[in-house]
Amino acid sequence: MSSGKVFLGVLAGLAAGALTGILFAPAKGSRTRKRILRKGENYTESLKEKFDDFVDDINEKVEKVKDGVSDFAEKKMAKPEKAEKNKKAATV
């Protein structure tokens, strides 16, 4: 199972547990609705932060791959040029 699915399952479980706890708590309806709204905002903000971190991590990895591919391509392009120069020097 991928870590993303596990993470989403844990998040869903936490949200369901918090919502159930708030709904069964002895408080006025308006107070309970405010609590639910606050909890939802907290979870939303937390999820946004984690998503931003995930996107930053992916962007870092993509940049590393791009750099690696560029370096590899430069090395491969330099080899034929060197071979051609050596060939010309040998024939002269």
Image (spheres, rainbow, N blue to C red):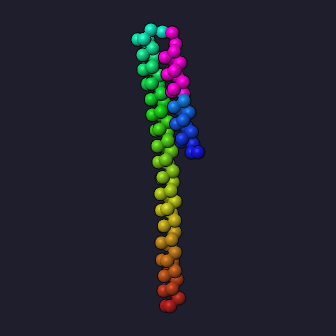
Tell whether position 80 is magenta.
no
What percent of the width, then of the height, locates residue 53? Answer: 49, 39
Compared with 30, 49 (above or below) is below
Residue bounds of the magenta highlight: 14-26
Determine the residue positioned at 52% across, 36% down. Answer: 8
Q: Where is residue 31 in the image (x, y as percent from the top left)?
A: 44, 11
1 relative position to 74: left or right:
right
Q: Residue at image x 51%, y 85%?
A: 87
6 or 79: nearer the viewer: 6
Q: Which residue is most to the bottom?
A: 91
Q: Quadrant of residue 7?
A: top right
x then y, percent, for residue 32: 45, 14
Q: Which residue is drawn at 44% across and 8% down?
A: 28
- Image coordinates of residue 80 in percent, x first then y, are 49, 77
Main SS, magenta residues: helix
Residue that lies at the very extreme toward the right in this rendered image: 1
Along the line of sight, the residue nearer the viewer: 41 or 20: 20
Give the farthest residue toward the left: 30
Quadrant into which the N terminus falls: top right
Please state the total of marks drawn on the protein image. Answer: 0
Q: Check the image and report above or below for 32 versus 17.
A: above
Residue 42 or residue 75, whichever sits in front = 42
